[in-house]
Image (spheres, coloured by chain):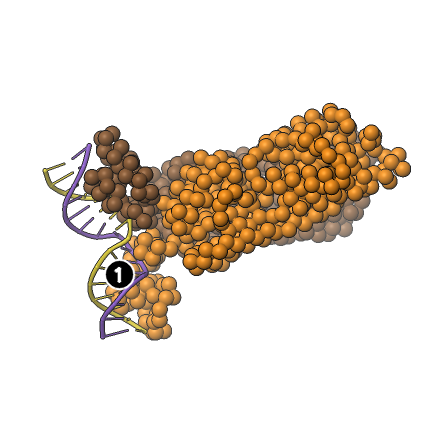
Chain colours: A orange, B brown, C yellow, D purple
Amino acid sequence: MANIKDVAERAGVAPITVSRCINNSGFCSPETRKRVEAAIEELGFVPNRLASGLRSKRTKTIALVLTDITDPFFTTIARGVEDIASDAGYTVIFCNTDESISKEQMYVQMLLEKRVDGILLVPAQSTSNSIALIQKHNISVVVLDRRVPNIKTDLVYCDSEEAAYQLTRLLLSLGHRAIVMLNRSINVSSCQDRLNGYRRALLEAGIPETTGQEYQGAYTQESGYEMTYKAMACSPKPTALVAANYSFAYGALKALREMGVRTPEDVAIVSFDDLPTTLYPFPFLTVAVQPAYEMGQKAMEILLKKISSPSSNCCEEIILPMEIVIRQSSGVSRANEKSKGGGVLKIP
Amino acid sequence: MANIKDVAERAGVAPITVSRCINNSGFCSPETRKRVEAAIEELGFVPNRLASGLRSKRTKTIALVLTDITDPFFTTIARGVEDIASDAGYTVIFCNTDESISKEQMYVQMLLEKRVDGILLVPAQSTSNSIALIQKHNISVVVLDRRVPNIKTDLVYCDSEEAAYQLTRLLLSLGHRAIVMLNRSINVSSCQDRLNGYRRALLEAGIPETTGQEYQGAYTQESGYEMTYKAMACSPKPTALVAANYSFAYGALKALREMGVRTPEDVAIVSFDDLPTTLYPFPFLTVAVQPAYEMGQKAMEILLKKISSPSSNCCEEIILPMEIVIRQSSGVSRANEKSKGGGVLKIP
DNA sequence: CTGTTAGCGCGTTCAT
DNA sequence: ATGAACGCGCTAACAG
């Protein structure tokens, strides 16, 4: 395969001149450029970016380490990242950690070996030490979606606390008092934030003890389903659910329908991160929506900035607001419901 | 940053010995290995895969070029690919072409420059010449989801023709005669196959002229919505729709509901590639499901095989069957419907 | 605007 | 089981 020297000989110039043409670095006369481009064409020359990366210490490659590309939330982030990256001439490696710290470590090691210019990381868990490792090697890193304690880093995430607070407030304003939280059992900031927002709203409303109404499960529809059955077996019976993600919301919908409990008439549901509206025809859930695409874009933009000026140590912390989209699943005021005789489950 | 020479000095061995330890190539005594590993640990040495790739001509990186990672079908493929790839020590670059040939060309150029070991490609269009370019550079390539004419290559795709045939047969067996096809207006084999399968079933049933019942649109819910309105304005009014993808099916559901037309009582719907069942609680659509995860796995396995033995020129062509999942949207026999007085739309 | 020199960090090749 | 020499293909640094 032809290399830069072959091209240089054929064009009657020095290799470095070819290099400058390819990379638009330095100057070269239009005529020289023409000869070089002709030679490239004739030889079918394709620059070797391994060699140039070895020399220049830039690979024009970044990595996106997330938990699971299959999750529509992360898929959308990935698309935002890739759009900005490819515009800037970067290529994106993606890695699925499945929230396993050891997988995360393995990937980070591989990425360091490949000398990626930067890493966008959704930490597998709060106890992850991958960020520190990346920083130790002077690789630019931007953390996505989740905070990690005791580490100074650029960060892009959403205000889950406030969103959970607003969702819970919405339910309270509709007259609900027995409000259950379905959350994940994982050491991740967004889950903790959602729990905190929920608690803040209840506390503010003078509803003191919520721990009996907080359920924790794995991130699956089945888990949401099971938690809902458990919650509905308790007294007082819940009249509303706050689902920390759409899987739980869907599991809950399924369980409730099975029990003959109507949504929202008997039990209202609010949730986080419904599917993208392009993916289904009849949106039903009241949700707090994270601007996933913008998160990906923004994180990639910050990463590009860091890559081009690694000196600036100041860390950006972008906290994006979530949008509350009110649809049917949250229902209308329970006062109205009662007066209309609706709802088989009454507040005791 | 420490390099292999530093490690060698510290361990009191030659650089090549360190290399052999890292890559498990050649032999080294347990004791030597221990000293080398200690040195690596102490220096925080991370092998430079740019340099090793430059020398060995293997990057342990492959690329997945698809149309849009945001499409659940491709997302699932991507996950299948990445699972197999990471098990084999490979890293995956992903690229979104949006079915643009020029984007595809740009990405392929970048990937060739990066000397990826292989490429999994969903061709942007049938006229793509990217495959030939990749092959010319002796890079292993496996084509996914779509055939490309006049090119000999390894290939993994699903039997869309047969699936469309079966779906249409199902509608015919339920008594439908006015069956409309909602398809994409793009030069892609899977779309053509679906059209052909639909036509074959109708022809076989003695329904000759179908062209007036074939609609073509862009790959969006809105397009499915509009095509459905057009189709329903025609005479004879359709009693069933074959949607070439879930976006069309969802657009159709929306349009029909708006018109006060019931599904499946008045108009039945069958479709391709519903959302993964983990993504929603109440599956409704009768669909032909492509085994997306297995497609990704299989394609990656073939790619690995090709990478490790590039000499074998024989091309594998894997045609996976699609699974027909019958749910509510296809309805029950129209004969029954009629006798029960159901269905506002009668066959003329 | 173009060229010369040197070396990035590793593994292939051959040797012992 | 280990080592020496060389070069993979490119660009940084400096020169003119």
Query: B249 left or right of B156?
Result: right
The quarter of the picture where residue B35 lies is: top left
| Image: C2 above or below A52 | below
Question: In what element is the residue under mark 1?
Answer: helix
Quadrant of the image for the C terminus of chain B? top right
Across and down, in percent, residue B338 comes to 81, 34
Name the residue beneath numbered marker 1. Answer: A5
Query: Can see residue B169?
Result: no
Given residues A214 and A292, the one toward you in this image is A214
Q: Amino acid at mark 1?
A: Lys
The quarter of the picture where residue B274 lies is: top right
Report the residue at 47% width, 36% height from top.
Answer: A101
* Neighbourhood count class around disc 1 (C-alpha, 10 Å): few under 14, some 14–19, many 20 upward: some
Across and down, in percent, residue B313 comes to 35, 41
Given residues B21 and A197, the one toward you in this image is A197
Query: A285 left or right of C16?
Result: right
Report the residue at 31% width, 65% height from top.
Answer: A18
- Numbered marks: total: 1
Query: B88 left or right of B328?
Result: left
Query: Can see residue A206?
Result: yes
Report the residue at 67% width, 29% height from top.
Answer: A227
Given residues B159 and B86, the one toward you in this image is B86
Across and down, in percent, residue B46 comes to 33, 44
Report the residue at 55% width, 54% height from top.
Answer: A298
Across and down, in percent, residue A287 comes to 69, 44
Query: A112 left or right of B326?
Result: left
| Image: A189 above or below A81 | above
Tell which subunit mark 1 falls on: A
